[in-house]
Amino acid sequence: MGAGKTTPKQRQRAPSQRALENRARILDAAEQVFARDGFDGATIRRIAELAGVPLGLVNHHMGSKEALFQTVVGRRAEELSTARLDALDTLEREDGVTLDRLLGAFFRPYLDRAGADAKWRAYARLVAQVSADPTWHHLSETYFDPTARRFIAGIARLYPGVRTADVSEAFVYSVSAMLAYQTSHWRIGALAGDTGATGTAEALIAFCAAGINARLSAAMPPAGS
Amino acid sequence: MGAGKTTPKQRQRAPSQRALENRARILDAAEQVFARDGFDGATIRRIAELAGVPLGLVNHHMGSKEALFQTVVGRRAEELSTARLDALDTLEREDGVTLDRLLGAFFRPYLDRAGADAKWRAYARLVAQVSADPTWHHLSETYFDPTARRFIAGIARLYPGVRTADVSEAFVYSVSAMLAYQTSHWRIGALAGDTGATGTAEALIAFCAAGINARLSAAMPPAGS
DNA sequence: GTCTATATGTAGATAGAC
DNA sequence: GTCTATCTACATATAGAC
């Protein structure tokens, strides 16, 4: 196996800084295009064009369109899950779990990032697509469900005797509200004549905490009876 | 202009019962395919195949793919808006407006139909697509916003002095919760280990009414301050 | 009104030069 | 590793026979 002359131990492949840069540019561009046009509406050509790389590089670095989508989603989902679980761990370690704080631990890692970075705002549209489309259920299972189950269990502990299905329902309502603000704030503006700013973390937490509490506190009869 | 022999006054076009049937079958098939695959993922070919009509008939009867989508959405949206506004009119005429009843007037016309008919369940996925995608904002403006504004005004009247933007925000959260149940109940099942039934109208109203009340009652400082 | 055949464009993916 | 040229498939839409 011929050793390189200038860099002795470089047996197989050099990372090549340009390759890494191109990879990152493709991921960023794909995120933007997938968020705007949806998975089916997006084209590899637009992604390559926006990234400023030749068309062939996209498939070369990322594989199929579907694999690229999963990579794009997974990259941010993993950062987010880590932050959320860290916040939850801290709460539980300090024995300070309340519904408000628990929702804050789930919402704020995303809302903080979305407030500061347009790339994270685009990510909400990706998640909304995955959540609404059973085709992507394996992505939900891999990236979202394990974290969601920890928070659902945390909420259930606050309401002894409650059914997990009811907690899951209320939790999905809450997540949908968070996503709805990110994906539909253009519609909120259209519906409201005034221009008051909306969408603070506090407003969202107030809405969801009250909703969850009402849904789980009430002696609501099982749906079937 | 030769008059027909057998049917004298048939100057321009007969409705032709088969044509009407084909039109209806195409609309139903389109609704199903658009709901399952999304606008971009759907193909005219699948729609024609599912409807059992030749490919050319779809464009002939419905025009472009985009026009077909709008027809599909509009058909149900108009029935729904009528039912919702009727219920609201009745409430206001009888001076019996409460937040719970108002949400019931908005939610029940849809939930009743969705509970009885799979076609209405598919419609939720169409609405979710329209709501999440600014590309379709003209559809929202035409079919959804006028009705939504009436309900937002009704809620605002219950909370004197509240900002319309805040009511709109809480209303969009609520609608998203309704849509989320229809589009993501597969995920609720996956998240909950148990199999308890969920998704009653009462559960949804309890969640949203409490959330809206908390969001609008609290002396929440404007987001900017 | 109904249906077949096809025009025209564009998609994802890849083979092979550099 | 990078990039160009291209293969193959399938999309919407329509022209024109019946």
Image (spheres, coloured by chain):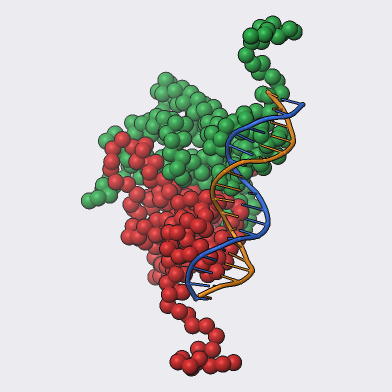
Chain colours: A red, B green, C orange, D blue
Q: Nearer the viewer, residue A125 or B62?
A: B62
Q: Percent from the top left, x then y, of residue B29?
A: 65, 37
Q: Nearer the viewer, residue B200 or D10?
A: D10
Residue drawn where x is 50% and y is 57% of the image: A45
Q: Quadrant of the N terminus of chain B?
A: top right
Quadrant of the image occupied by residue B30:
top right
Residue drawn where x is 56% and y is 35% of the image: B64
Q: Nearer the viewer, residue C18 or B60?
A: C18
Q: Percent from the top left, x then y, of residue B100?
A: 45, 35
Q: Percent from the top left, x then y, of residue B84?
A: 49, 28
Query: Relative to B11, is A107 on the left or the right?
Result: left
Residue drawn where x is 45% and y is 59% of the image: A49
Query: Is residue B195 in sight in this rendering?
Result: yes
Q: Nearer the viewer, residue A109 or A138?
A: A138
Query: Relative to A149, is C6 on the left or the right?
Result: right
Residue drawn where x is 40% and y is 50% of the image: A182
Q: Percent from the top left, x then y, of residue A186?
A: 38, 44
Q: In the image, is residue B88 above or below residue A163?
A: above
Query: Is residue A107 in sight in this rendering?
Result: no
Q: In the image, is residue A145 above or below residue A5?
A: above
